[in-house]
Amino acid sequence: MLEAIAAIVKALGYAAALTGAGLAIARVSLAWGLKTPLHLPTSLVRSAGSLLVLTSCATALIFFLRLGGDADAPTLAAIFLSPLGVALGLQLIGGLWLALKTERRTAPIGAVLILVAFGVVGHSASRGMLTSITIILHVTAAAWWCGGLWILLATGRTASTNFPELVGRFSRQAVWVVMALLIAALTTATLLLEFRIDLALAYQQALLTKLGLTALLLALAGVNRVVLTPQLAGQDRARIRLRRMIVGELLLFAAIISATAYITTYLSPHDTTDAAHAHGGEVQVSGPIAIVDPWAPAMPGGAPTGAGYLTIVNNQPVEDRLIAASSPWAERVTLHASSTDRGIARMCQWACNSPRMWALKIP
């Protein structure tokens, strides 16, 4: 249940980030040198900034609950002193900036903070600086595209005479933006997958679905540019048809955002990295937390206790921790840690080793 809520919150946060930041940066490029003032949906920018603030706080709360809900030092450090905390802080400040400075020239500063946050945490950030840069470039291009569509939609609803000029300007700039988006996306995916393609993996199947949605978006944009844009000067109905096509593009953006939220919540490019190596490549693990090879040896009759063993793989881009265990076949389950002291193997209950300091890290 908590994972589903996290995915929904993440999708809303992505939508708010792309909309708010996209409107701020697209306004700058589209309004440059325009003869008449550019119509900007300021209420939408404020709403997007406010929603991003709420989703940032909700994400922090969800992570806090997943770590056990105890406000101890390790938990607070994992939230606020981690890459996730930095990203949430950037989104929080950026969202507030957009909400409070919507109509000012400094509004793009908030957009920059929001876009940089995508390179701080997540699947791409776990691969180093290069993937962080490519994902920021990818998200920036997507945000500009999304924001530009909202501006066109808002301008098309009015009787503005600069609508054909604005559409033409958007189309010319979009060619370069889409090229940057595709190059950044392909580079990021290649680095994440380490040049290995295996469509039997759930993560790569999800990426393929996202690629298909993007192809539909590009096809729709191509129709707008080649067919409808040239008709704007002579046909009033062309404006109506173009607005409907823009709504279709925004709906496809919503589908892509939802797919991205699902991928980053439930799947990981690291699914088989360490577990497969450790088990001779015979296992494939998926999901945020995976249990590999659980087993328990047979115990002699009358034995009051037994032992069980398993490998836990954390595929998430953030730390997690094991705080308790239970079994329908045992009255009580305790966690033990083994250690070697002066050549002697010892085992004691996890509590004696400060379990709240223990964390499961990315393979």
Image (cartoon, rainbow, N blue to C red):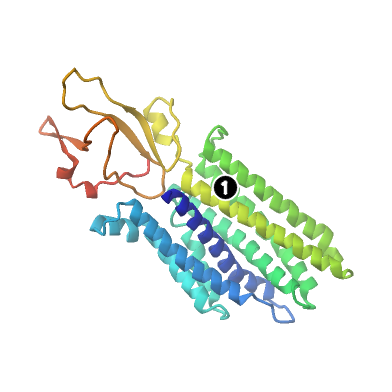
Residue 339: x and y in percent read 17, 35
Residue 30 position (above or below residue 347): below
Q: Which residue is mark 1?
A: 187
Horizontal placement of 99 versus 312: left or right? Answer: right
Between 276 and 159, which is closer to the camera in this rendering? 159
Question: Residue 21 sits in which quadrant?
Answer: bottom right
Which element type, helix, strand or loop, lies under badge 1? helix
Q: Is residue 11 visible?
A: yes
Question: Residue 103 sits in which quadrant?
Answer: bottom right
Residue drawn at x 52%, y 44% as measured from the top left:
191
Horizontal placement of 273 versus 263: left or right? Answer: left
Residue 280 position (above or below residue 21): above
Residue 88: x and y in percent read 42, 62
Residue drawn at x 63%, y 46% as measured from the top left:
211
Between 25 and 155, which is closer to the camera in this rendering? 155
Residue 210: x and y in percent read 61, 46
Horizontal placement of 80 versus 159: left or right? Answer: left
Between 96 and 190, which is closer to the camera in this rendering? 96
Residue drawn at x 47%, y 73% as measured from the top left:
96
Residue drawn at x 64%, y 73% as measured from the top left:
27
Q: Which quadrant is the C terminus positioned in?
A: top left
Q: Is residue 180 visible?
A: no
Callout 1: few (<14), some (14-19), or many (20+) C-alpha neighbours within 10 Å?
A: some
* Residue lying at the far top of the rendered structure: 300
Residue 199: x and y in percent read 57, 34
